[in-house]
Structures are given as structure tokens and as C-alpha cells.
Image (cartoon, rainbow, N blue to C red):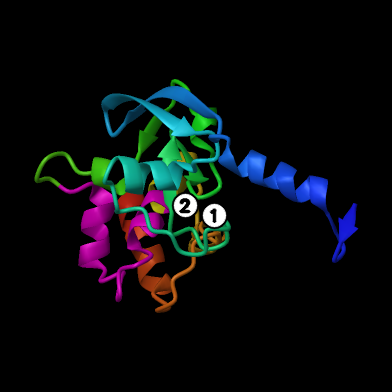
């Protein structure tokens, strides 16, 4: 029966579907050197896992669509946008966030270079820029400022610190 353009059966079906719990999965992964096992809703992004479940708020939720790079982390040594990465796909993975770069009180060389080059203003994009820079260096994309810019083009800095960010990456890669 149709009432006001909606079938009565579909409205009831939608209510029943909404009452059912979302499917969950148990996932074991290593985050910043610590092995963790968690049960999560299958739709949970790595970014939400890090921020909401583990309290690691360094990775930022910028666009939540993979376009700004503020959420960049390393998964098994590769750069990923954590907002687009489903936690359930990371069984056994090793995740490194900005919180895991420093060795105690000793900053990672790129973190130190960001300070020395004054490569940040508001700081919102800085964790993602640093994680992307670490990936860029590891991948060997530091042959020129142009190559660094291209390799890090998925990371947006709204304050426009690109020249200093490139200098920090060059410094860390040993080019300057």
C-alpha cells in the first residue's frame, strides 16, 4: 500500500534495519610499537580508531575525504590517508602516527627540521605534513624541490608554508 508516496512495507523494513547492530570485527594491529587488539564497527576508519578509541589525536580530521592529507599516517611504512582506510583491512598491520615518531624526548629528524625551518604556522596540517615527509624521504622522492612538492602534493597547508616544508624535507634527506 502506498501512502504519501512511500510504501508502508519499506518504512517498517528501514526501522528494523536501523535497530540491528552494525557488524563488528576484531582486529589486531601494532600502533606506534604497541600491539593492540580491538573490536570495531566494520565502518570505522583508521583515523577514528586512532582518535576516538586510542586517544591519539595528532592525526587531524580535515576534509574526511582524502583530499587534504591532514590525517596522513604510515601503514607498514607506506603513507595512507587514515580517513579513507578501514580498520578492518589492517589485521596484522604496523601503524605509525606522529605520536610514534619521536624516540622519547628526542625528536625525529624531520620534526626537528620543521622547527629549524619554521615550517608551520597554525600547525593543523603539521602532523600530516611530517608523516608524508617521512614517507617521501623513505620512498626516495627527494631529488629536487619539485620532486618533493609533487610527492607531497596530497597534503594541503592552508597557511602556505610549502617552501619551508620542502626545505625541512630537503634538510632531513641530507640535501641541505
Comparing marks 2 and 1, which lies closer to the viewer? 1
Q: Which residues are magenta?
A: 107-132
Query: Where does the image place residue 7, in percent across and percent down from the top left?
Result: 85, 53
Q: Dividing the image into 4 quarters, which one contains the C terminus?
A: bottom left
Disc 2 and disc 1 in contact, CB within 8 angstroms = yes
Q: Is residue 111 magenta?
A: yes
Q: Secondary structure at mark 1?
A: helix
Which one is nearer the viewer's eye here, 2 or 64?
2
Along the polypeptide, which appears first: circle 2 or circle 1?
Answer: 2
Residue 121 is one of the magenta-drawn residues: yes
Indicate which disc residue 151 carries.
1
Q: Would you say residue 76 is visible in this rendering?
A: no
- Determine crowd level at label 2: few under 14, some 14-19, many 20+ residues with C-alpha closer than 10 A: many
**Considering only vertical position in the picture, is 170 above or below 139?**
below
Q: Which mark is residue 142?
A: 2
The residue drawn where x is 49% and y is 41% is: 44
Q: Nearer the viewer, residue 78 or 23?
A: 23
Q: Which residue occupies 35% across, 70% down? A: 164
Amino acid at each position: 500500500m502506498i501512502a504519501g508516496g512511500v510504501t508502508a512495507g519499506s518504512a517498517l523494513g528501514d526501522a528494523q534495519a536501523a535497530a540491528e547492530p552494525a557488524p563488528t570485527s576484531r582486529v589486531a594491529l601494532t600502533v606506534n610499537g604497541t600491539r593492540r587488539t580491538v573490536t570495531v564497527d566494520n565502518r570505522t576508519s583508521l583515523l577514528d580508531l586512532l582518535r576516538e578509541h586510542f586517544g591519539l589525536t595528532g592525526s587531524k580530521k580535515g576534509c574526511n575525504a582524502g583530499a587534504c592529507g591532514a590525517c596522513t599516517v604510515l601503514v607498514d611504512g607506506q603513507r595512507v590517508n587514515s580517513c579513507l582506510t578501514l580498520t578492518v583491512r589492517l589485521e596484522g598491520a604496523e601503524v605509525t602516527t606522529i605520536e610514534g615518531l619521536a624516540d622519547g624526548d628526542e625528536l625525529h629528524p624531520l620534526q626537528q627540521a620543521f622547527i629549524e625551518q619554521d615550517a608551520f604556522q597554525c600547525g593543523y596540517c603539521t602532523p600530516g605534513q611530517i608523516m608524508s615527509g617521512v614517507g617521501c624521504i623513505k620512498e626516495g622522492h627527494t631529488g629536487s624541490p619539485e620532486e618533493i612538492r609533487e610527492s607531497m602534493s596530497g597534503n594541503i597547508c592552508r597557511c602556505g608554508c610549502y617552501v619551508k616544508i620542502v626545505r625541512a624535507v630537503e634538510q632531513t634527506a641530507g640535501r641541505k
